Image: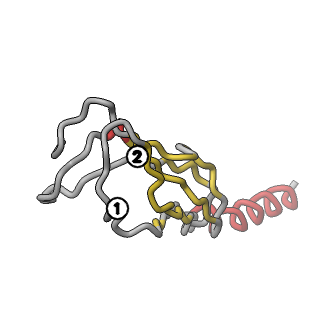
Amino acid sequence: MMKKYSILFGLILAVLPAVCFASIGVGVGAGQITYDEPVHAGNIYILPAMTIVNTGTETAVYSARLAFQQDQVALRPQPEWFQFDPLESKIEPGSAQVVQVRLTLPLKVIPGD
């Protein structure tokens, strides 16, 4: 009976460090996405892709979305104008996923929107 407890206790101690030191992390290799050419209403533009890296120790699901810095003074385009492919990715630790970014301007857009 004593052997069962010591084996179980040993297994719990062996698994405990892996659970305690697991982490979720992310790295995004995009920087600032800029488009230097004039854009026109109704057109679709393929923007530079970005790479999402799982820097953690656990598999995790990541999604892409448009976000602005709070004090950003540049124009803020509408989030629905941007599409990300894939929108959501399950990424293994140390692995990466390239995400394509597309800008679709509405037919009736006012310059400066």
Dot 1 amino acid type: Tyr
Mark 1 nearby-residue class (10 Å; few <14, some 14–19, many ≥20): few
Q: Are marks 1 and 2 in contact (CB under 8 Å)?
A: yes
Say what amino acid the circle numbered 2 marks: Leu
Residue identifier under label 2: 103
Crowdedness of circle 2 by 10 Å Cα count: few (<14), some, many (20+)? some
The answer to which of 16 and 33 lies nearer the viewer is 33
The one of 11 and 104 positioned closer to us in this rendering: 104
- The residue singled out by tag 1 in the image is 35
Q: Which residue is located at x 11 percent, y 58 percent?
A: 73
Spatial distance from mark 1 to mark 2, Cα to Cα?
10 Å
Position of residue 31 measured from the top left corner of the image (x, y, whole percent): 37, 69
Marked residue nearer the N-terminal end (1 or 2) = 1
Q: Report which quarter residue 42 is drawn in.
A: top left
Residue 58 screen position, x and y as percent: 62, 59
Assign a secondary structure to mark 2.
strand
Instruction: Look at the image and tell me in which quarter the C terminus lies.
Output: top left
